[in-house]
Amino acid sequence: MAAGIPLNDEDRWDWLILLRDEALSALKKGAKGVVVTCSALKKKYRDVIRTARLYDEDPNANVHFVYLRADKATLLARVRARQGHYMKDAMVDSQFAALEEPDDAECKQLKDVEIVDVKGTIQDVKVLASAAVDRVFLNQAAQ
């Protein structure tokens, strides 16, 4: 990506598995929770991370996604405002071309996706993301 070349599926598989395995390793070492940040642009990428539930010895292990939703114009404006960053317009284009937003079926059936609109200020997004995480914990406690 730093060279301006978008990643493809083959580039991502090992990386996604490594993210999942590192999160599981942290849990096995006693971490009470793990936050992993990645684009997970496609449902099949999110599914790789979801398989952590199958590998964790704790039957209460859960995986949740906070999907930061933005339109292309918002992201392009933010990328253009960055100084010296490798992410350029073409990379935003490639990510939108690959993007499979979580749809109603994924959100309602799997119940592990919270959607946060990121059009606002950074502070607005922090508040919305924090509220999304709070909802995850409240829903988990209710089960």
Image (cartoon, helix red, strand yellow):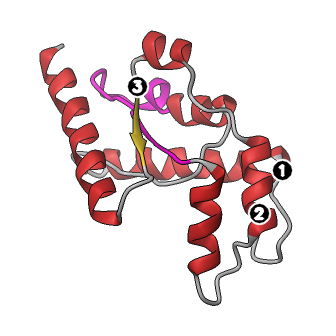
Label 3: which secondary element = loop
User: Looking at the image, which is closer to me, 97 or 110?
Assistant: 97
Query: Which residue is the site of mark 1?
Result: 8
The amino acid type found where label 2 is placed reads Met
Residue 112 rendering spot, x and y as whole percentages:
40, 25
Q: Earlier in the sequence, mark 3 or mark 1?
A: 1
Mark 3 vs 2: CB contact within 8 A: no
Name the residue: 72% across, 59% down.
92
Residue 49 rendering spot, x and y as whole percentages:
54, 36
The amino acid type found where label 3 is placed reads Asp
Q: Earlier in the sequence, mark 3 or mark 2?
A: 2
* Residue 17 disc label: none
Mark 3 vs 1: CB contact within 8 A: no
Q: Residue 93 is drawn in which quadrant?
A: bottom right
Query: Which residue is the site of mark 2?
Result: 91
Query: Which residue is the site of mark 3?
Result: 112
Up the image or down, 72 lies above or below 61; here it is below
Q: Earlier in the sequence, mark 1 or mark 2?
A: 1
Q: Give, as a single range, the part of the protein colored magenta.
A: 52-70
Q: Is residue 53 left or right of residue 102?
A: left
Residue 59 rendering spot, x and y as whole percentages:
31, 21
Q: Is residue 87 left or right of residue 103?
A: right
In front: mark 3 or mark 2? 2
Q: CA distance from mark 3 to mark 1?
A: 25 Å
Label 2: which secondary element = helix
Label 1: which secondary element = loop
